[in-house]
Amino acid sequence: MVNTHLRQNQKTIAWEILDWIFPPSCCGCGIKGAVICPSCRKSLTLLEEPVCRICGKPFDPLDGCKTCRSQEMRFTSARAAFLYQGIVREAIHQLKYSGNLEISQVFANYLLSVYLKQNWEPDFVIAVPLSKEKMNERGFNQSEWIAKPLAKAIRKPYLKGALRKKQDTDSQVGLGRTERIENLRGAFQAEPILVRGKNILVIDDVMTTGSTFNECAGTLKASGAKDVFCLSVATTDSLKD
Ligand SMILES: [Zn+2]
Ligand SMILES: [Zn+2]
């Protein structure tokens, strides 16, 4: 545990030094100095109503939610700050593949404003876990980097050990809805002592079909969790699927 923390701190310091030597450029306009410069930050718009009250995706109120029609959602509700496009998409990509603490803090702030609009009362916060293999390969879990500052801001504990990913699964990229569900089945394991009777907030970077949140929620509930709330930085637009 101490080792992991130490490694993470060293990694953080290393990135900060790198940022100082090679200042990041803005995902939106390329200007040097910040991952999302102040003027591009102003151009970001939070996802607005109407969104599905279950999965949080934009939907046509006359037609109902396509995403929730195609699978039974096991979480109580999910919300996202943005649509997965443009600057946000680029920034998530940068966070995931090059690691950047500044961007995870920015995202945590946006998630905080979405969180404050909900009537959620989680007992603690977790991030969608990565498998050991993936963690060794990437060195960090980008969702954890977003979840930790958020947990601090809402004064709830971050409980890493409540859910873990048992085995490495194939990437979800390029898989259809049914394949995504199949690919993740049984991939997570919850810690019953920590989750029983609790309301849990799960954080991820991107929600696509919702199958990752769904599998996490199903696993947590099978171990006795009460409500599972899900929050992601971005969600794909099911109206354009
Ligand atoms: Zn910019
Ligand atoms: Zn829905």
Image (cartoon, rainbow, N blue to C red):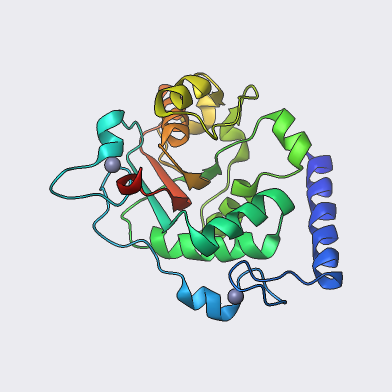
Q: How many discs mark residues in the rendered view?
A: 0
- On the question of residue 223 being in view, the answer is no
Q: Quadrant of the C terminus?
A: top left
Q: Nearer the viewer, residue 159 or 232?
A: 232
Residue found 48% across the figure and 33% down from its top? 212
Image vertical order of residue 223 relative to residue 229, above or below? above
Image x and y of residue 60, in percent: 20, 50
Image x and y of residue 118, in percent: 33, 56
Taking the view exactly as shown, the residue that stands out farthest to the bottom is 39
Image quarter for ligand 1 equals bottom right
Q: Quadrant of the N terminus?
A: top right
Residue found 60% across the figure and 60% down from its top? 91
Q: Nearer the viewer, residue 237 or 187?
A: 237
Image vertical order of residue 137 relative to residue 158, above or below? above
Q: Is residue 227 left or right of residue 131?
A: left
Q: Is residue 25 left or right of residue 187?
A: right
Q: Is residue 15 left or right of residue 214?
A: right
